[in-house]
Amino acid sequence: MRHLLASAALVALVIASPASAGLLGKDKTKNSTPAPATAATSKAEVFKPATRAEIDAMLRASPLQQAAFFGTQFEHSPTDQKIGLYLSNALRALGRNAEAADTAHKVLLFAPDNTDVLLAAARAHIADNNAFYAIDPLQHVIELKPKDWQAYSLLGVAYDQTKRPDEAQSTWAKALDLSPNNPAVLTNMAMSKVTRGDIAGAEPLLRTAVAQPGVTVQIRQNLALVLGLEGKMPEAESLLRLDLPPQQADAALAWLQQAVVARAAPASTTAPTHSWDSVKASGS
């Protein structure tokens, strides 16, 4: 898709007014009544491109506010790469992933080598469970910036989502070469192992990730998940209670205990009724 090329033919129509063509005398020119403004002219006069200060302030606003603001800006300035990027990110934050990907690709039509927008398109496709369409943009980022660990990390996710686990692990290994002990990459590797039943293999990766500076709550909760599934409930509980309010931590522990029983039981046993993410999000 990076090979798509956009072409536009711009035709300027210059229409001389009677006055400028010398068809009206001075007196008639002075006394002539200006034509009423058209709807297009009024619209153009109302819209004003955002200042840098306005953009910076909006980037601190909610995703909903950002989507409305940058949507209007992008409608009037569809070749503004930054505005298109901000709009794509805001739409993805709202869960409107297909729209986020579409917006990014509109920018890529005239800026095919913008690596930030290529990454935005890839993230939107992955979030939309269409990771196959993220692979090409990410490979293009790697061509342009071969030392960008983010591109390798996301490409690993795309490979994993498209059921290419070996390629995913090797791609994540390359990301770790570029950014050793990066918690985001380690977490991607670990959670891929979890989805394939390799709980024990995920634990050391997540322990390394949690030990890094500035680690996120999400990563600690993933470690709690793995520890709980391994039956290491006391340590899992300590991590849960570190980050979650009591009621939500209790719900998560109950889910983990149910999951451990389900893993130990025959395949016909009913699995936990809620996903780990839903338990963390709702506290129920």
Image (tube, rainbow, N blue to C red):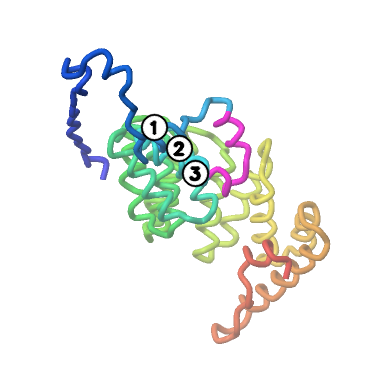
Residue at mark 1 to residue at mark 3: CA–CA distance: 14 Å
Q: Is residue 109 visible?
A: yes
Which residue is at 80% across, 57% downward? 241
What amino acid is at disc 1?
Asp
Range shown magenta: 54-66
Does the magenta run of residues contain 61? yes
The residue carrying mark 2 is 73
219 lies left or right of 237: left
Mark 2 and mark 1 in contact? Answer it, CB < 8 Å.
yes
Q: Residue furthest top?
A: 26
Looking at the image, tell me whether mark 2 or mark 3 is earlier in sequence order.
2
Instruction: For marks 2 and 1, give the CA distance.
Output: 9 Å
Residue wearing tag 3 = 89
Kindly identify the residue that appears in the image at 65 percent across and 73 percent down: 259
Q: Is residue 226 left or right of residue 253?
A: left
For residue 284, above or below residue 30: below
Amino acid under disc 2: Gln
The image quadrant of residue 39 is: top left
Does residue 38 appear left or right of residue 191 in this picture?
left
Is 36 on the left-hand or right-hand side of 183?
left
Residue 58 coordinates in the image, percent (x, y): 59, 36
Quarter holding the C terminus is bottom right
The residue mark sitting in front, 2 or 3, is: 2
Residue 170 seen from this side: no
Query: Is 62 included in the stretch rendered in magenta?
Result: yes
The residue under label 3 is which amino acid type? Asn
Q: Secondary structure at mark 3?
A: helix
Mark 1 surroundings within 10 Å by alpha-carbon count, few (fewer than 14), some (14 through 19), many (20 or more): some
The disc at residue 80 is: 1
First-in-chain label (2 vs 1)? 2
Q: Nearer the viewer, residue 41 or 138?
A: 41
Q: Give the residue drawn at x 26%, y 19%.
A: 28
